[in-house]
Amino acid sequence: MSQNDQVLHYPIPAEAALEPPAEWARLRQGCPVARVRLPSGDEASLLTRYQDVKQVLADPRFTRLLNADDAARLSANESGGLFSSDMAQVIPDGGEGHQRWRRLVGRWFTAKRMAALRPVMEEMAEQLIDDMVKRGRPADLKASLGFPLPVYVICDLLGVPAADRDRFAYWSDTLLNLTRFGQAEVDAAQAEFFQYMSDHVAAKRARPGEDLISELIKGADADGGGLSDLELLVTGMALLVAGHETTANMIGKMVGMLLADRSRWESLLADRSLVRTAVEESLRFDANPGFGLPRYLREETEVGGTVLPRGTTVICSMAAANRDESVFDAAGEMDLGRSPNPHLSFGSGAHSCLGQALARTELQVVLEVLLRRLPSLELAVPVQELRKVDGLVVGGLSEVPVRW
């Protein structure tokens, strides 16, 4: 099949919540650069092979900002959500400015700092599991643990009250909108979120605490520049969205995958040293990651043997790339001890996920605490009944019913 024969609707639907769309394998083999129609009606090119996705994500010439006139819109909403809103342009997309921003913010997300946070995360997880057990079974693991834990952690890091977490959830969803919310609702929610964060930054300027925003206010970089109020505000918003939504969904999907075939759970109970590699394999094996990463090509480039003209929007499907048999042996199997595991779930290159050490630590803590506290954990519904989250940029399960 050549790239021009067929235009697929994107996101491509899958038969089951934890299974990849059958098209992924077909596209990787025969049509690695495929034409797709997005929810907005605009066309883009979909990349599904590991090397192609890695090449584009690591190439600094390709921008994550979709605000050019000829860039594809992801959703029908004019504000465009996360990738093409005015706010997305506040944080520099490349060059010195981007490196400076990553250097300032990245200090907070080192593996060493995350290891220091680990006991706090364990305590939070224990408390949430206690509450879930008290309420009785069956329980929704996503609502009881998967969602609140990353929210508590990111609120703690940013110095915002965890009591506001339901508002953050709603604001995040509107920022991650594809088809779920109308324009007026998105605009109103983003204005509220902007105001909330603006007030928070002002309060931290007046009375700094032991949190990331306070440190960013205090911490001028070695070259003398700190972040402006607008950069601080957008950084706070971006971290709140990225820091809870993706990990909350991943906790639910990871537990769902491990319980879908209970021999996986049993092997972890028998050997806890597999937790670290099991988390990495869950990230690689995730067939429901959401939209993928869009990139706008500012110049003509060749990808996967296809010349893409300047102005093309490509969608990098890391999840499809993570199933590439040329990189991963038995890519369609979940191997909890897989090592090395160079999956692309956190992206690649200059824009790889800043919070990956945080996400990894949260996922490992959740798994360790669940194995210790609820060894008899199992799905409370047949795996075919698990339902996907739809209409947002992120993927996930709408609930993860469990018993023990």
Image (spheres, grey):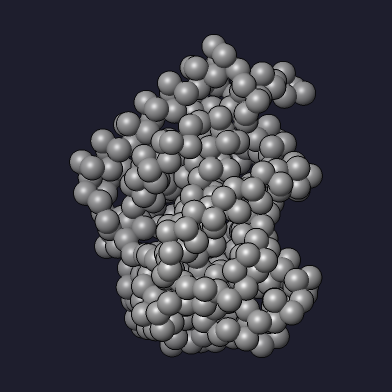
Location of residue 261 with respect to 35 vertically, above or below: below
Residue 319 image offset from top left, x and y in percent? 54, 71
Can residue 249 be seen here? no
Can residue 123 be seen here? yes
Location of residue 89 with respect to 352 vertically, above or below: above
* 305 to the left or right of 181: right
Residue 286 image offset from top left, x and y in percent? 54, 72
Residue 33 image offset from top left, x and y in percent? 49, 74
Residue 113 image offset from top left, x and y in percent? 75, 41
Instruction: Give me the residue at 37% from left, 26% from top.
Output: 195
* 392 to the left or right of 323: left
Instruction: Give me the residue at 55% from left, 70% from top.
Output: 255
Give the tally of numbered discs.
0
Instruction: Give me the residue at 56% from left, 69% from top.
Output: 254
Instruction: Give me the residue at 27% from left, 58% from top.
Output: 179
Q: Nearer the viewer, residue 228 or 262?
A: 262
Quadrant placement of the N terminus: bottom left
Location of residue 279 with respect to 239 vertically, above or below: below
